[in-house]
Amino acid sequence: GAGVSQSPSNKVTEKGKDVELRCDPISGHTALYWYRQRLGQGLEFLIYFQGNSAPDKSGLPSDRFSAERTGESVSTLTIQRTQQEDSAVYLCASSSRDRGVGYTFGSGTRLTVV
Amino acid sequence: SQQGEEDPQALSIQEGENATMNCSYKTSINNLQWYRQNSGRGLVHLILIRSNEREKHSGRLRVTLDTSKKSSSLLITASRAADTASYFCATDKVDSSYKLIFGSGTRLLVRP
Protein backbone atom coordinates (compact mmCIF):
# COMPACT_ATOMS: atom_id res chain seq x y z
CA GLY A 1 0.00 0.00 0.00
CA ALA A 2 0.90 3.66 -0.14
CA GLY A 3 1.47 3.95 3.58
CA VAL A 4 1.52 2.00 6.82
CA SER A 5 -2.00 1.12 7.86
CA GLN A 6 -3.00 0.39 11.45
CA SER A 7 -6.30 -0.83 12.80
CA PRO A 8 -8.29 -0.11 14.77
CA SER A 9 -7.47 3.58 15.17
CA ASN A 10 -9.07 3.57 18.60
CA LYS A 11 -9.84 0.73 20.98
CA VAL A 12 -11.51 0.85 24.37
CA THR A 13 -11.39 -2.38 26.32
CA GLU A 14 -12.17 -3.59 29.79
CA LYS A 15 -9.38 -4.49 32.14
CA GLY A 16 -8.57 -8.18 31.84
CA LYS A 17 -9.66 -8.57 28.23
CA ASP A 18 -7.30 -9.46 25.37
CA VAL A 19 -6.75 -7.10 22.44
CA GLU A 20 -5.25 -7.49 18.97
CA LEU A 21 -3.75 -4.59 17.08
CA ARG A 22 -3.00 -4.87 13.39
CA CYS A 23 -0.32 -3.31 11.20
CA ASP A 24 -0.12 -3.49 7.42
CA PRO A 25 3.33 -2.22 6.32
CA ILE A 26 4.40 -0.69 3.05
CA SER A 27 4.75 -3.35 0.38
CA GLY A 28 8.38 -4.36 -0.02
CA HIS A 29 9.49 -3.10 3.39
CA THR A 30 11.26 -6.00 5.04
CA ALA A 31 11.49 -4.42 8.48
CA LEU A 32 8.54 -3.79 10.81
CA TYR A 33 8.58 -2.21 14.26
CA TRP A 34 6.14 -1.74 17.12
CA TYR A 35 6.48 1.12 19.59
CA ARG A 36 4.39 2.27 22.51
CA GLN A 37 3.86 5.92 23.44
CA ARG A 38 2.28 6.89 26.71
CA LEU A 39 0.63 10.30 26.94
CA GLY A 40 3.15 13.11 26.70
CA GLN A 41 6.12 10.77 26.51
CA GLY A 42 8.58 9.45 23.96
CA LEU A 43 8.41 6.23 21.98
CA GLU A 44 9.21 3.00 23.75
CA PHE A 45 10.54 0.20 21.53
CA LEU A 46 8.60 -3.06 21.77
CA ILE A 47 9.55 -5.47 18.98
CA TYR A 48 11.28 -5.57 15.58
CA PHE A 49 10.82 -7.98 12.68
CA GLN A 50 13.33 -8.22 9.84
CA GLY A 51 12.43 -10.56 7.00
CA ASN A 52 12.57 -14.18 8.08
CA SER A 53 15.03 -13.55 10.91
CA ALA A 54 14.07 -14.18 14.52
CA PRO A 55 12.33 -11.06 15.87
CA ASP A 56 13.99 -8.77 18.39
CA LYS A 57 11.57 -8.97 21.32
CA SER A 58 13.82 -7.17 23.78
CA GLY A 59 11.37 -4.31 24.34
CA LEU A 60 8.27 -6.29 25.22
CA PRO A 61 7.39 -5.22 28.79
CA SER A 62 5.88 -8.51 29.99
CA ASP A 63 4.80 -11.94 28.80
CA ARG A 64 1.31 -10.54 28.29
CA PHE A 65 2.63 -8.91 25.13
CA SER A 66 3.32 -10.87 21.95
CA ALA A 67 3.52 -10.14 18.26
CA GLU A 68 3.54 -12.08 15.04
CA ARG A 69 4.36 -11.31 11.47
CA THR A 70 3.67 -13.49 8.47
CA GLY A 71 6.60 -13.22 6.08
CA GLU A 72 7.00 -9.60 5.07
CA SER A 73 3.36 -8.65 5.42
CA VAL A 74 0.84 -7.97 8.15
CA SER A 75 1.76 -7.99 11.83
CA THR A 76 -0.47 -8.31 14.87
CA LEU A 77 0.41 -7.18 18.38
CA THR A 78 -1.54 -9.01 21.06
CA ILE A 79 -1.92 -7.85 24.64
CA GLN A 80 -3.42 -10.42 26.97
CA ARG A 81 -5.24 -9.64 30.24
CA THR A 82 -4.98 -5.90 29.63
CA GLN A 83 -4.15 -3.57 32.52
CA GLN A 84 -4.82 0.14 32.86
CA GLU A 85 -1.07 0.78 32.52
CA ASP A 86 -1.30 -0.61 28.97
CA SER A 87 -3.29 2.46 27.92
CA ALA A 88 -1.19 4.21 25.27
CA VAL A 89 -0.85 4.81 21.56
CA TYR A 90 0.70 1.81 19.81
CA LEU A 91 2.65 2.83 16.74
CA CYS A 92 3.80 0.61 13.92
CA ALA A 93 6.51 1.54 11.43
CA SER A 94 8.15 -0.14 8.48
CA SER A 95 11.34 0.43 6.57
CA SER A 96 13.52 -1.08 3.90
CA ARG A 97 16.70 -2.83 5.01
CA ASP A 98 18.74 0.21 3.94
CA ARG A 99 19.98 2.00 7.06
CA GLY A 100 20.19 5.21 5.08
CA VAL A 101 16.44 5.73 5.04
CA GLY A 102 14.01 6.51 7.80
CA TYR A 103 10.95 4.74 9.06
CA THR A 104 7.42 5.25 7.78
CA PHE A 105 4.94 5.29 10.63
CA GLY A 106 1.28 4.42 10.72
CA SER A 107 -1.21 6.67 12.51
CA GLY A 108 -1.27 4.42 15.54
CA THR A 109 -3.89 2.68 17.64
CA ARG A 110 -5.01 4.53 20.75
CA LEU A 111 -5.73 1.87 23.38
CA THR A 112 -7.74 2.79 26.46
CA VAL A 113 -8.16 0.19 29.19
CA VAL A 114 -11.03 0.97 31.55
CA SER B 1 15.98 2.68 27.86
CA GLN B 2 16.30 6.14 26.34
CA GLN B 3 19.25 6.66 24.03
CA GLY B 4 18.44 10.21 22.94
CA GLU B 5 17.36 13.04 25.18
CA GLU B 6 16.00 16.25 23.73
CA ASP B 7 16.45 19.69 25.17
CA PRO B 8 14.41 21.75 25.82
CA GLN B 9 11.33 19.72 26.69
CA ALA B 10 9.14 22.58 25.50
CA LEU B 11 9.77 25.66 23.40
CA SER B 12 7.49 28.59 22.60
CA ILE B 13 8.47 31.10 19.94
CA GLN B 14 6.91 33.77 17.75
CA GLU B 15 6.19 33.07 14.09
CA GLY B 16 9.18 34.06 11.98
CA GLU B 17 11.75 33.28 14.68
CA ASN B 18 14.15 30.37 14.53
CA ALA B 19 13.69 27.28 16.70
CA THR B 20 16.62 25.21 17.92
CA MET B 21 16.26 21.81 19.53
CA ASN B 22 19.09 19.69 20.87
CA CYS B 23 19.55 15.97 21.26
CA SER B 24 22.17 14.10 23.26
CA TYR B 25 22.85 10.38 23.08
CA LYS B 26 25.05 7.84 24.82
CA THR B 27 26.53 5.25 22.48
CA SER B 28 28.11 5.15 19.03
CA ILE B 29 25.67 5.51 16.18
CA ASN B 30 25.33 4.75 12.47
CA ASN B 31 23.00 7.66 11.96
CA LEU B 32 20.68 10.05 13.79
CA GLN B 33 17.23 10.97 12.57
CA TRP B 34 14.68 13.65 13.40
CA TYR B 35 10.93 13.08 13.31
CA ARG B 36 7.92 15.28 13.75
CA GLN B 37 4.65 14.30 15.43
CA ASN B 38 1.38 16.17 15.23
CA SER B 39 -1.43 15.54 17.71
CA GLY B 40 0.17 12.51 19.34
CA ARG B 41 -0.27 10.13 16.41
CA GLY B 42 1.98 9.02 13.55
CA LEU B 43 5.49 10.38 13.21
CA VAL B 44 6.88 11.84 10.00
CA HIS B 45 10.52 11.41 9.07
CA LEU B 46 12.23 14.78 8.56
CA ILE B 47 15.92 14.23 8.02
CA LEU B 48 18.69 11.67 8.53
CA ILE B 49 22.32 12.49 9.20
CA ARG B 50 25.00 9.80 9.05
CA SER B 51 27.77 9.49 11.61
CA ASN B 52 30.38 10.73 9.10
CA GLU B 53 28.39 13.87 8.29
CA ARG B 54 28.52 17.08 10.29
CA GLU B 55 25.72 19.14 8.80
CA LYS B 56 22.72 18.59 6.57
CA HIS B 57 20.02 20.85 5.16
CA SER B 58 16.50 20.23 3.94
CA GLY B 59 14.40 23.28 3.11
CA ARG B 60 14.07 25.31 6.33
CA LEU B 61 15.66 22.53 8.38
CA ARG B 62 19.32 22.38 9.35
CA VAL B 63 20.73 19.49 11.33
CA THR B 64 24.18 19.28 12.85
CA LEU B 65 25.92 16.30 14.38
CA ASP B 66 28.89 16.31 16.74
CA THR B 67 29.92 12.72 17.37
CA SER B 68 32.68 13.76 19.77
CA LYS B 69 30.08 15.34 22.04
CA LYS B 70 27.40 12.79 21.12
CA SER B 71 24.95 15.54 20.33
CA SER B 72 22.82 16.87 17.49
CA SER B 73 20.76 19.97 16.90
CA LEU B 74 17.75 20.69 14.71
CA LEU B 75 17.25 24.26 13.57
CA ILE B 76 13.98 25.36 11.98
CA THR B 77 14.38 28.75 10.35
CA ALA B 78 11.63 31.31 9.81
CA SER B 79 9.14 29.25 11.80
CA ARG B 80 5.46 29.11 10.94
CA ALA B 81 2.42 28.32 13.06
CA ALA B 82 2.15 25.06 11.09
CA ASP B 83 5.51 23.97 12.54
CA THR B 84 3.79 23.54 15.92
CA ALA B 85 4.38 19.88 16.80
CA SER B 86 6.56 17.57 18.86
CA TYR B 87 10.01 16.81 17.49
CA PHE B 88 11.93 13.64 18.30
CA CYS B 89 15.46 12.58 17.66
CA ALA B 90 16.15 8.89 17.10
CA THR B 91 19.44 7.06 17.00
CA ASP B 92 20.49 4.00 15.03
CA LYS B 93 23.07 2.44 17.34
CA VAL B 94 26.10 0.58 16.08
CA ASP B 95 24.97 -2.98 16.63
CA SER B 96 23.56 -5.74 14.50
CA SER B 97 20.00 -4.49 14.30
CA TYR B 98 18.47 -1.47 12.60
CA LYS B 99 16.34 -0.45 15.54
CA LEU B 100 15.80 3.23 16.30
CA ILE B 101 15.78 4.44 19.87
CA PHE B 102 13.76 7.61 20.36
CA GLY B 103 14.20 10.44 22.79
CA SER B 104 11.46 12.03 24.84
CA GLY B 105 10.84 14.88 22.39
CA THR B 106 10.61 18.66 22.32
CA ARG B 107 7.16 20.24 22.14
CA LEU B 108 7.36 23.28 19.90
CA LEU B 109 4.67 25.96 19.93
CA VAL B 110 4.88 28.65 17.25
CA ARG B 111 2.64 31.59 18.11
CA PRO B 112 1.05 33.41 15.17
Image: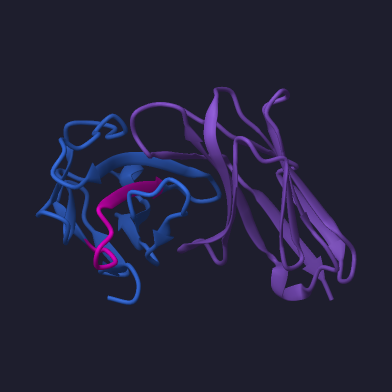
Chain colours: A blue, B purple
Q: Is residue A60 above or below residue A93?
A: above
Left/right placement of residue A66 relative to residue B32 reads left
Residue lying at the far left of the rendered structure: A70
Would residue A8 be found to the left or right of residue B58 on screen? left
**Quadrant of image for the C terminus of chain A:** bottom left
Is residue B10 highlighted in magenta? no
When asked about the image quadrant of residue B81, the answer is: bottom right
- Rendered position, A95 above or below A28: above
Residue shown at 34% from the left, 55% from the top: A96
Residue drawn at point x = 17 percent, y = 37 percent? A64
Estimate the x, y position of residue B50 in percent, counting from the top left: 58, 41
> Which residue is more in the foreground, A54 or A89?
A54
Q: How many marks?
A: 0
Q: Residue furthest front?
A: B52
Q: Nearer the viewer, residue B87 or A88?
A: B87
Whether A29 is among the magenta residues is: yes
Residue bounds of the magenta highlight: A23-36
